[in-house]
Amino acid sequence: MLLNMQSIRKSFDNVEVLHGVDLDLDAGEVHAIVGENGAGKSTLVKVLAGNYPDHEGSIYIEGKETALRSPRRAVEAGIGIIYQELNLLGELSVAENIFLGREPRHAGMLVDFREMNLCAERILERLRLDIDPTQPVGTLRIGLQQMVEIAKALSLNARILIMDEPTSALTNTEIERLFATVHELSGQGVGIIYISHHLDEIFSIASRVTVMRDGNRVATRAVTETSKVELIRLMVDRPIEAWNVRLQTKPGRPVLKVDGLRLERPDRKEPHILRNMSFEAFEGEILGLAGLLGAGRTELLESLFGIYGSLCHSALSICGRKTTIRSPAEAIGLGMALVTEDRKRNGLVMCMTIRDNMSLVSLAGILKWGMLSPALQRRRTGEAIAKMLIRCRS
């Protein structure tokens, strides 16, 4: 057995979030972990990655008990992790991010940039990625940044590889590349722990699956001996009455009409990013946008939300009324909302509280006599947390 985690317990602020969890992994196996948000999946693998050394329980690697007191100690033990949240430095190059803290050096002193770039290029080719290793990683779209995170983990030549929601920002083509790499690594004897909310992925690449709920391991099944319905039942602890129900709605009046939208590049010299985009969205309708990475899906939504200001030109109507949107504030005032592609960088203010983040775009609704009402803010935020099933300690 490559890995054996026994009776792992972890607490935050005297609140126990892992309740004696067991997990094992064989060499060459892809072992999936599933569960709802807050089930403890990411906390468990962060214990294995050395992020939470103050845990109870034992970890054995190839039969030897191992104390993983830091991320560096985990790397030395042959453990690599691809985190759900990106851990990249945008100002550094792709190669510098891949080998951060492990840069090849001339005589152990100066960084050998030529060797580092060549090694990064080989890893990127293995993932069939056409990325310049000298390019600043912050200039890449979120999907490609996710692939750089994967490349960074592969560079460790780990015996145990943890993948925490690795496909959350990837296109279908990139997912296929990733799965091919997973099969290649498992064939070389690497044990892979794979966390995902996408059950189709579990049945595509995993041999076993462990279900977690409320900090407990509730079941481990061979993938060939279970089903999506059973896994969901185990995750939510109740029978599933309906599976994949499609809402039947009758579209009403047009609420958004876009005619001839075009988005110029900032230098205004090269061809437009978007050209002659026209469509309508109707009341009660879900309108899907599809396209490959770089096709302009994200730019289209950001344009509608006023992020590009005067670089965007279009005839726009909302509920039959012609309008122009030049800023996100104007879009919000007209009843529009945008869930950003990169939530952490563009959607949230990480140094502010959950309550303040949730209130930022709706301050007018929590004012009393022209001043912010803490009681009203707490009530509105509490209702949203309950509705969205958000797990937070405070």
Image (spheres, helix red, strand yellow):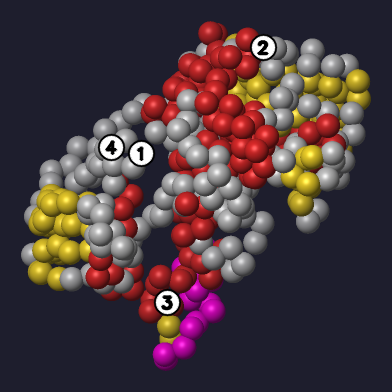
Q: Which residue is mark 1?
A: 293
Mark 4 residue type: Gly
Which part of the image, by quadrant, shows the N terminus?
A: top right
Mark 3 residue type: Leu
- Mark 3 is surrounded, within 10 Å at the Cα level, by few (under 14), some (14 to 19) or many (20 or more) other residues, namely some
Q: Secondary structure at mark 2?
A: loop
Our reading of the magenta stretch's main secondary structure is helix
Residue 157 appears in the figure: yes
Where is residue 315, by image quadrant? bottom left
The spot of residue 159 in percent (x, y) is: 74, 21
Q: In terms of sequence position, does the residue under pointer 2 or pointer 1 come before the other? A: 2
How far apart marks 1 and 3 lie (CA) works out to 35 Å
- At 55% from the left and 44% from the top, the residue drawn is 134
Taking 37 as reference, is 307 above or below it? Answer: below
Taking 358 as reference, is 234 above or below it? Answer: above
How far apart marks 2 and 1 lie (CA) works out to 30 Å
